[in-house]
Image (tube, helix red, strand yellow):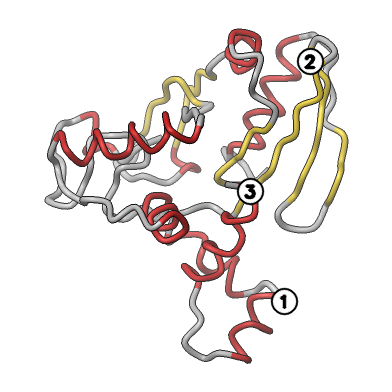
Amino acid sequence: MPPPRFTQRRLKERDVDFCYGSQDGLLWPILDRIFELELIYDNSEAAVLQRKSFLQKRGIGICDVVESSFREKIDASDLGMQKVKLRNMLQILRKHPKIDTLLFTGGNSKNGPEYFFRRHLKDSEENIKLKIVNNEPPRIHQFVLDGRLIKTVSLIAPSGAANMAVGSMQLYKELKAKNPKFNTLDFRVLQYKEFF
């Protein structure tokens, strides 16, 4: 879910009024580096149109598995979400039969996208199970929906809060030892590039 300032219409100077548009988030800077997009980071319509155009050209859809939630504490943490209502992802997948991969920007920890997707599958009562393909980060699963094989990939969250998790990963430590200038954003760029 976006930071509360997006619903309160109190955007910061470098926020973009679009999915993952927080100036503190890393998804667009990651994609900007991978695809050399030269994105604008401000509240303009041009910044929004750049992102929409990129997604359309690449055939990428973007949505949050959470349709709505409430927060006691006004912050952007996933853990702070309460009374969560999930979006009907199975309906979205049925409506868009070309989708063969779901990229989760986070994992199976409480209130993470994989966690909510698993809950959605369980609540759907359709007996759809995620099967492990690779249990090492990024975790990859697959499932069958109406005879169609769909893969899920749980990428490292594109948020500053996930930096500690990145810093503790063995591969990150090895790459950092080889190049002291290597950072957590560089690591995400490497991971996301493989799947985008």
- Residue nearest the observer in this picture, 124 or 156: 156
Could you tell me which residue is drawn at 65 percent across and 9 percent down?
94
Q: Amino acid at mark 3?
A: Phe
Name the one closer to the observer, 106 or 41. Answer: 41
Label 2 with label 3: CB-CB less than 8 Å: no
Q: Earlier in the sequence, mark 1 or mark 3?
A: 1
**Amino acid type at mark 2:** Leu
What distance separates the C-alpha of mark 2 from that of mark 1? Answer: 35 Å
In the image, what residue type sits under mark 1?
Answer: Gln
**Residue 51 falls in which quadrant of the image?**
top left
Per the rendering, the mark at residue 92 is none
**Location of residue 142 in the rendering, given as x and y in whole percent from the top left corner:** 81, 33
| 180 relative to 104, above or below | below
Q: Which residue is mark 1?
A: 170
| Residue 195 image label | 3
Q: Which of the marked residues, 2 or 1, is nearer the chain's N terminus?
A: 2
The structure residue drawn at horizontal position 26% and vertical position 53%, both measured from the top left corner, is 23
Q: In the displayed orientation, state which residue is furthest to the front.
A: 57
